[in-house]
Amino acid sequence: MALGDFGMICGMIASEMQQLRRNPLSVPITVDQYHQMIAAGILEEGQPIELLDGFLVRKDRSRSGDNPMTVGHEHVWVVYQLGELNERLKPHRCHIRTQQPITLPPDSEPEPDGAILQGAADAYRQRLPGPADVLAVIEVADSSLHDDRTAKQRIYAAAEISRYIIVNLVDRVIEVYTIPDAGQGRYASMDTLRSGQVLHLPTGTEMFVDVAVEKLLP
């Protein structure tokens, strides 16, 4: 399928999903059904979509004002920097994955730009990480900032993921959300970190891996 055709289809899906959300008769799909669709070839694995609240949503990694089908250069740079943190995390028996799915039953399977997971990568050779495996999720936000602050925050808080981090490329800050309130679908605490401050990444122990904020801001 040509990239242009897929972009058109994604646009149609997004439009239809908005209508379905307003339609009380719509039936969202579950994580299991999503996996069955991929296994059956209905959805091609690796396409830029993710399952959120039971709906297929195109991943937005573009720069504000650019073509939403593109990936912003700064976004790419930050994701690379996140991957470079692996060598610092592995001695603490955890690791970071970039832009890979995490399963949040019953109806979400987001693909965060970064996810710090307990244990070694080999622990996930036969399965996807679930909420109990995730120490922190990280989203790199430019044109997606509003959705990352709202829909993604709600999904991650409902899954009781203890730490949600947004690398905010619009305001050049890092937002750190903690104390998930699953019932309200939000985090009770939010700190804003700026250049010159330090981001503390959890390791599942009393130890944290400290990263200078400017190391993750282009």
Image (tube, helix red, strand yellow):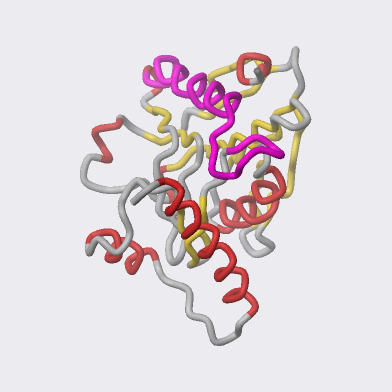
Q: Nearer the viewer, residue 89 or 113?
A: 113
> What x and y, as percent, mark residue 88?
44, 15
The vertical placement of 31 against 163, above or below, is below
The vertical placement of 151 against 115, above or below, is below
Q: Is residue 149 rendered magenta in the image?
A: no
> What x and y, as percent, mark residue 179?
66, 46
The vertical placement of 151 against 193, above or below, is below
Query: What residue appears at the point 55 percent right and 59 percent down from the top-left corner?
Result: 11
> What x and y, as percent, mark residue 91?
37, 17
Q: Nearer the viewer, residue 36 or 156?
A: 36
Query: What residue appears at the point 54 percent right and 38 percent down from the top-left corner?
Result: 70
Query: What residue appears at the point 69 percent right and 29 percent down from the top-left corner?
Result: 169
Image quarter (top left, top right, bottom left or bottom right) of the C terminus: top right
> What x and y, as percent, mark residue 168?
70, 32
Query: What residue appears at the point 43 percent right and 62 percent down from the top-left corner?
Result: 105
Range shown magenta:
62-90
Q: Nearer the viewer, residue 58 or 205?
A: 58
